Image (cartoon, grey):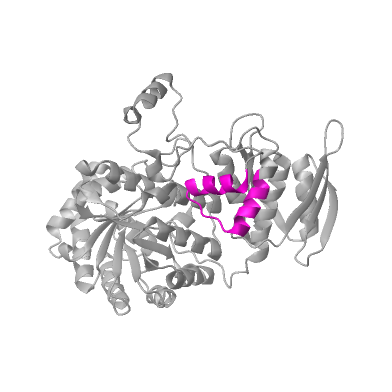
Amino acid sequence: MDRLYIFDTSLRDGEQSPGASLTSDEKLEIAFQLAELGIDIVEAGFPIASPDDAAAVRRIATLVKGPTIAALARCKPEDIDVAWDSLRDGESVRLHTFISTSDIHLKHQFRMTREQALEHAVAMVKRAKSYTSDVEFSPMDATRSDWAYLHAVLRAVIDAGATTINIADTVGYTTPGEFRQLIESIREHVPNAHRAVISVHCHNDLGMAVANSLAGVLAGARQVECTINGIGERAGNAALEEIVMAVKTRPDVYGVQTEVDSAQIYKTSRLVSNLTGIVVQPNKAVVGSNAFAHESGIHQDGVLKERSTYEIMDARHVGLSDSTLVLGKHSGRHALRQRFEEMGYRLSEEELNRAFSRFKEIAEKKKETTTKDLEAILADEIVSVHEVYRVQRLQVTCGYPVVPTATVELRLPSGEDRLEVATGTGPVEASYMAITRIVGLPIRLAEYSVRSVTSGIDALGEVSVRIECNGRTFHGRGADPDIVVASAKAYVNAINKAASTPQQAGERVKTGVGV
């Protein structure tokens, strides 16, 4: 079968999701996991956007081995130069440049004629080619472009040195049948198309990003650009996990194969969800919490007799475990380590000790600890955020007509403990007021959400918050059977990110939606 290359743009297009913001350390952590997943090309960022973005791309290009590391640049000399400066120390890198080809974009956004856009495209591909042999060109809004003009642009940029041509459905406008015809027309009417890999990049505005991408594969595209959990601008991008499992499950239809280690999919999905704060919907294909769950009696009966009656994929193929091992308060470290390894996590002794201590706290309050409880413990305790502040003690009083009051003690960076008392309209607000007084940062709570990680009266509660501090947004999360404690942990988690992240040297420039 033909090789299908997987181009992951979670760190670039995915981070453009409203509300998603990743630190340099978080981007690097995701990039390492994408390498473990077996991704072919990782688009690490948009270096011209900010010094922070450029620095993150530089770290990823230098430290992450395995995938080709790509950086995005508009068809502008300064973009190309800054992108290359961020990539130059990597062992396998790609410059990815773009400009619109649709009349609506050229007229209203770029203020260019078709001829001018073509000249810019050719000149910047040549400039990129002077730096590296691996150059990708994307005609933004290709699916709303005149096909004859699009063919002419593609022919010219391939002659100029582009080795990948990426057909972008930037606004999610096309349909599967139409998109397949477009890719076929490119193969037929661009005489040098065989000299470049044809790629597709589809958005999900009409809910057809995956279907359109797969239609492109059927037409001969051999690279798909996608994101973990389908995150991205507006309604998001094609979901990587759905693309990979579709071609793996139906090789008879698509006739291609990837190098992705699908057993790493669920772990990667969870990591991206935790770090971006974008929760995966329960009924999400492949990685949703209900994707391999059966409630119907008929379905349960069928699956118990023969799994394939109602499951077209094996849960283990995406990194989920079928184990029914029950962990409780009498379980030891060895059992916990074994369960984590079955879930795909290998912890150091220090990490295991922290997780075990947290596990014991929860096990004392719950009859049994489930896989989702353990995932929440990992996300809560095994994190890459520098712990500037730590909750040492939290006590609240509330009721009717008592005024909610919180007493909070935090461990400070100096090592000393500081205690503060505050009131609020409820115990959570009172706790947050006390924490804010201790840390002394200009914090505004922008979003607060809580959900039950597991079912039952003793369910583990997971709190997700977004705070604004010094003009930047930070996401935090915490989990605990006591929802007030979980709320405090989430708030302090976000504050730690704010306290440990240096101010950007400049604001992000407005560079359009990209491809």
Residue 175 located left or right of residue 395: left
Q: Position of residue 270 (x, y in %)?
A: 50, 48
Number of callouts: 0
Residue furthest bottom as drawn: 130
Residue 16 located left or right of residue 500: left
Q: Looking at this view, is 284 or 384 the one in front?
A: 384
Is residue 470 among the parts visible in the rendering?
no
Question: What residue sits 62% from the left and 59% below the top?
Answer: 350
Q: Position of residue 391 (x, y in %)?
A: 75, 53
Residue 304 located left or right of residue 180: right
424 w.r.t. 90: above or below: above
Question: What residue sits 75% from the left and 65% below the top?
Answer: 413
Magenta span includes 36: no
- Residue 124 in which image quadrant: bottom left
Q: Position of residue 381 (x, y in %)?
A: 63, 52
380 w.r.t. 451: above or below: below
Magenta span includes 347: yes
Q: Main secondary structure of the magenta part?
A: helix
Q: Looking at this view, is 326 or 138 the one in front?
A: 326
Q: Looking at this view, is 132 or 36 the one in front?
A: 36
94 w.r.t. 475: above or below: below
- Residue 83 in which image quadrant: bottom left
Residue 507 located left or right of residue 204: right
Is residue 312 among the parts visible in the rendering?
yes
Residue furthest top as drawn: 297
Question: What residue sits 54% from the left and 40% below the top?
Answer: 371
Q: Position of residue 268 (x, y in %)?
A: 46, 51
Question: What residue sits 56% from the left and 68% below the top?
Answer: 507
- Residue 406 in which image quadrant: top right
Q: Quadrant of the C terminus?
A: bottom left
Which residues are the magenta region?
332-359
